[in-house]
Amino acid sequence: MHDLLFANQEEWVSSDDPRPYFDAYAESLGLDLDKFHADAQSTSDFIKRQAAEGKKAGVKHTPWLIVGDEVVLPRSFEELDQIIQEKL
């Protein structure tokens, strides 16, 4: 499904409702549509809960990293490593 979504992104990305495309991809893979819909809803619910918790905690962007008591936004692994080393 992952590969189909990315391979066909231009097809569904501008749609007001991409679900019919997703259903067609799921059917082409032989997926159980009822389970597919239930899993999609569960994932959507999880993302909404996580977003609400993040907003409540003051998260303003992702990734949101805290080193020590400071919010950091490193541009690379090396920069993150340097920030961590400085805090140690």
Image: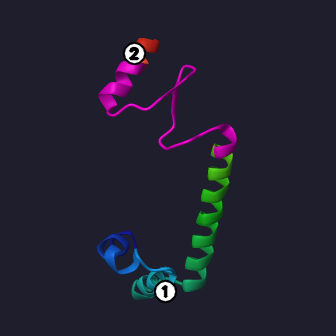
Q: Which residues are magenta?
A: 55-83
* Kind of residue sitting beneath label 1: Pro
Question: Number of marks in the image?
Answer: 2
Asked if the magenta segment contains residue 58, the reply would be yes
Q: Helix, strand, or loop for circle 2?
A: helix
Secondary element type, mark 1: helix
Return the disc, 2 or 1, that comes first in the chain's sequence. 1
Type of amino acid under label 2: Gln
* Image point (67%, 55%), residue name: 49
Q: Is residue 73 left or right of residue 53?
A: left
Callout 2 environment at 10 Å: few (<14), some (14 to 19), or many (20+)? few
* Image location (x, y in percent) of residue 78: 30, 27
What residue sits right under mark 1 in the picture? Answer: 20
- 30 to 51, vertically: above or below: below
Name the residue located 47 percent from the left edge and 41 percent from the top edge: 63
Identify the residue shown where x is 44% and y is 86%: 30
Coordinates of residue 39 in the picture (x, y in percent)? 59, 71
Query: Which residue, given by chain and number where applicable, does mark 2 sit on?
Result: 85
Camera-side residue of 29 and 24: 24
Mark 1 crowdedness (10 Å alpha carbons): few <14, some 14-19, many ≥20: few
Among the 4 quarters of the image, the one containing residue 35: bottom right
Give above or below for 46 relative to 35. Answer: above
Q: Position of residue 32 (x, y in %)?
A: 54, 84
> Please, which colouring scheme is shown?
rainbow
Q: Give the image quarter of residue 45.
A: bottom right
Residue 51 shown in magenta: no
